[in-house]
Image (tube, rainbow, N blue to C red):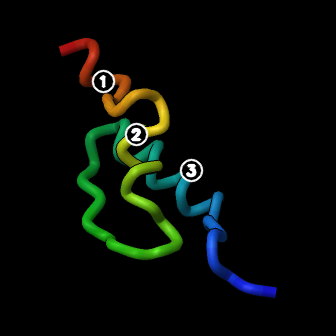
Amino acid sequence: MSSEGLVSLGPLAIACLARDAGFPIEVESEYLPKALLDFAWTGGSTPDAKAR
C-alpha cells in the first residue's frame, strides 16, 4: 500500500476550522494540502473572502 494521495482528515478539519476563525496556518506538509486548506476546491476563494 502506498501513502501517496493520502490526506489526514482530522488535522485538515481542525486546520480549516482554525483558519476560518482567523488563525494563521503556517505548517507545510504533504498531509495537509494547501489547496484544500485554502478552499481551492470551491473555485479558489475562501468563504470569508466572499463576504469582504
Horizontally, is 37 left or right of 6 in the view? Answer: left
Mark 1 touches mark 2? (CB < 8 Å): no
Q: Give the number of the disc on residue 13.
A: 3
Q: Give the number of the disc on residue 48.
A: 1
Mark 1 to mark 3 CA distance (whole Å): 16 Å
Give the amino acid at mark 1: Asp
Mark 1 to mark 2 CA distance (whole Å): 13 Å
Residue 48: x and y in percent read 30, 23
8 w.r.t. 19: above or below: below
Question: Quick one: SS at disc 1?
Answer: helix
Question: Quick one: SS at disc 3?
Answer: helix
49 w.r.t. 30: above or below: above
Q: Quadrant of the C terminus?
A: top left
- Categorize mark 1 by other alpha carbons within 10 Å: few (<14), some (14-19), many (20+): few
> Which of the two discs, 2 and 3, sits closer to the camera?
2
Choose the circle earlier in sequence order: 1 or 2. 2
**Residue nearest the viewer, comparing 50 with 4:** 4
Mark 2 to mark 3 CA distance (whole Å): 15 Å
